[in-house]
Amino acid sequence: MLQPPPARPGMREDEVDTPALLIDLDAFEHNLDHMAGLLAPTPAKLRAHAKTHKSPVIARLQMARGAVGQCVQKVAEAEALAWGGIPDILVSNEVVGPPKLARLAALARISKVAVCADDPSQVAAIEAVAEDAGVRLPVLVEIDVGAGRCGVLPGPDAVALAKLIAQSKHLIFGGLQAYHGSAQHKRTVEERRTLIGNAVDGSRRTVEQLRQQGLDCPIVGGAGTGTFQIESASGVYNEIQAGSYVFMDADYARNLDEAGVPVSTFRHSLFVLATVMSTPNRNIAVVDAGLKALAVDSGMPTIWQRPDIRYLSASDEHGKLEVASETTPPKLGEKLRLVPGHCDPTVDRYDWYVGVRGGRVECLWPIAARGGMH
Amino acid sequence: MLQPPPARPGMREDEVDTPALLIDLDAFEHNLDHMAGLLAPTPAKLRAHAKTHKSPVIARLQMARGAVGQCVQKVAEAEALAWGGIPDILVSNEVVGPPKLARLAALARISKVAVCADDPSQVAAIEAVAEDAGVRLPVLVEIDVGAGRCGVLPGPDAVALAKLIAQSKHLIFGGLQAYHGSAQHKRTVEERRTLIGNAVDGSRRTVEQLRQQGLDCPIVGGAGTGTFQIESASGVYNEIQAGSYVFMDADYARNLDEAGVPVSTFRHSLFVLATVMSTPNRNIAVVDAGLKALAVDSGMPTIWQRPDIRYLSASDEHGKLEVASETTPPKLGEKLRLVPGHCDPTVDRYDWYVGVRGGRVECLWPIAARGGMH
C-alpha cells in the first residue's frame, strides 16, 4: 500500500508529520550546481547514480544540468526511471535470470538501456533475451578495480568478455564498468588517491588492450561522491557515477580533504524529521525515528545544528538521544532534523520526499523506485 | 508506488523473483500453534505484536488461535489493522502531536483502540482529541521496567499518571505497559530471569499501589519472544506482547536455553530469497540482497542449510558471501534462502509476503503497514 504523504505543499516544516524524509531544496540545488561546475572543465560527464534518489524527478534535474544519463543498480530502478521519462539508463550491475532480463529488454523500446556482465554465460543470456525481444542492448564489461565484489580482472579477462559481447548479434560492446565502492569512504585523500590510482591504471591498461584488438570503449564509467575528482581528472574515465552528492550523509561528512578537515563542498540536504515522543528525564529524549526510519549500517544519525545532542541507539521505532547537561533539552513534541548515517538505504524506506525551503513545504516527490525486486 | 509481487501462487519456489520475502508456511504455523500451546496453561493471553508482521492476515491467524488482540507501535500500523478488520488494538507506545492523535481517535469508531502515555501533558492531549472526536479512549501508563527508554518509574509516578487518566472525562485507565525490550536478546536464561524478575517486581508493586487507590489494572502487558515464559508465569502480567516468535531471526537464534544450547522451540519461518548474481572466484559469491533487502543492525544474515557459506558484508544492493574451500560453491543464478539478522526491520522493506509450502508458492499477502509515519 502506498503510504499517504506526511505533508502538503504550503505547510510549515514544523507541521510535517513524522518520521518524514525532508530535502532542504536550497542545499540540494547547491549540490546539483556544484557538481555540474566541478565536472564542466574535465573530460568526464556525469551519469548520476539513481540508486541514491530513486526518483525520475531528481534524475531530470541532474540531466538539466548536464548529466548524460542515469545509473541504476537493478531493473526495478531502471523501470521507474524509464517510465518516468529518462532516456538513457545504465544498469551498472549484473542482471541475472531470464525474468529480470526480459523486463530489461522490454524497456529498451522506450529508453536507451545498457547493462553489465562479468561472466560469459551472462553474455549468452543477455543475447538470448535481446534476440527474443527484437532489440540490441549495449553491454559493458564490469572489471574489478579493487573492490573485490563483482567483475572480471582488468586486462585479458575483460578483453575476452568484450570480444564475446562484440561478436553477439543483438549486443553492442558498451565499454567498461570500473567502480571502486569501498574507496569512497576512505577518510584521507592519500588513501583514496592510492586506491583510485590503481583503478585508473587497471582501466587504462584494459582500454589500451581493447584498442589493440580493435575495440573502442564508448563508456569508461565509475567513481562516487568520495573520489570522483580523481577519476574525472584521469583522462581515462569519461563517465562519473556519483549519487550521494545530491544529499550527503553523516558518513560522507567524515571524509577529510587535503587539509585533514571534513570535506564540505557539498551540503547536507537530506534529513529525517523526527518528533520527540518521550522525555523520561533531563538528559534523555526519545524520538520516533529508529531502525525502520533510518539506516544505521554506517553509524547513528547526527542531530542537525544540535551538537549537544547525541543519538545513542536505535530500536525498531525509537531513537534514544542523550542531551548534554549544560544545554536546553528538546521539549516533548519538538521536531528535530536528523542527518542519516547512510543516505541510500535511508531513502529506500520512504514513499515520499518532502521538499522544504525557508521553513515551508514547497513540493512532494514520490520515491518511485523504492523497494522492489532487483 | 506499490511494487508488483515477485511471485504467483502455484509457482515453484525457485521461480520466485528476488530478492523476495518468503514465509515457510509449515514453520510459521508451527510457531503460531506452539505459542498458543505454551500460553494456554498460564493466566496470560497473547496480544501479539504486529510491529513484526504488519499484516492483518497474520493478525487474524493469531487471533484464531486465542490471541485477544494486537499490539502496534504506531498509528499507521493501527490504521492498517483496523482497516483490515482487527477489532482490538493497543498502541504500546506514546503517540505525540494532534494530527496523529486525531487519526487514532478516528479509528476508535471501527475498532477498540488503546494507547500509552508517560507524561501528564500527553494525557491532556489525548483527552482533547477524544473529546473532539466524541469517543472514549483507554489509556495505559507506560512504566520503565528497566529498558531505560520511554515510561515513568514504577510506583508513585505511575499511580499519579493513572489517576489523571481515570479522572479525564473521555479516557479510561487501561492498565500498565511494562515491556523490557533489551532483556529479550540477553543470551543466557539467568540474565533474562534477573532483568524480568525486576520488571515483574516493579509491575506488581505498581498494581498493588493502584489497587490501594481504588484503581484496577485491566491490562498488565509486556514481554517478548525472548522472555515471555517468565512474564506469563508471573501472575502479574496478563497480556504477552511477543511478535518475533512467528518468524524468528538469526539474532533470536543466538539466545540460549537452560542447557546452554540455542533455544529451538520456534522455527525460522522468514527468509529472504536471493539470487547468486556473480561468482568472481571459487570462494566468493555475490547475491542480490544487501542493505536494502535485509536489516543488518543485529548482525549479518545466515545462509539456510548452508553452514559452509558465510555472509561477509552487505552493500546497498549486494551481499558478499564466502564459500568454504572444501564444499561445492553455489552456481551463478542459484537461489539461496537467507535468515535475516533481525526480522522486524527486514519485513518493513517489503510490500509482499510470499508464502511457500512443499517447494510451491501457496499465497501472497500484502505487508499492509509497511513504512509510513508513526
Image (cartoon, coloured by chain):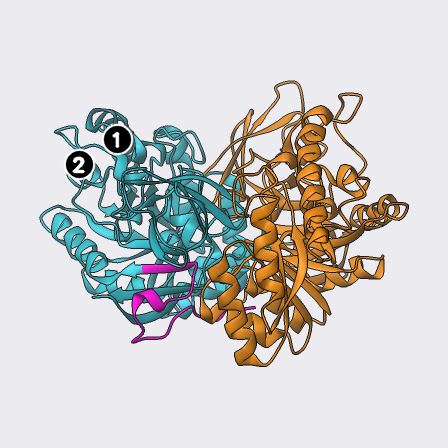
Chain colours: A cyan, B orange
Task: Tell me how far mark 2 sits from mark 1, CA to CA.
Answer: 10 Å
Magenta stretch: helix, strand or loop mostly: loop
- The image shows residue A60, relative to residue A268, as above or below, that is below
Magenta region: which residues?
Answer: A1-22
Query: On the rendered structure, is A300 left or right of B273?
Result: left
Q: How crowded is mark 1: few (under 14 residues within 10 Å), some or many (20 or more)?
A: many
Task: From the top left corner, tell me how far across and down residue A149 is, in percent.
Answer: 45, 33
Query: On the rendered structure, is B138 left or right of A214?
Result: right
User: Is residue B230 or residue A268 the one in the foreground?
Assistant: B230
Q: Do labels 2 and 1 share a chain?
A: yes
Dot label at residue A234: 2
| Foreground tag (2 vs 1) | 1
Query: On the rendered structure, is B297 left or right of A59?
Result: right
| Residue placed under numbered mark 1 in the picture | A196
What residue sits 12% from the left and 52% below the top?
Answer: A37
Residue type, numbered disc 2: Ser
Is residue A4 magenta-colored? yes
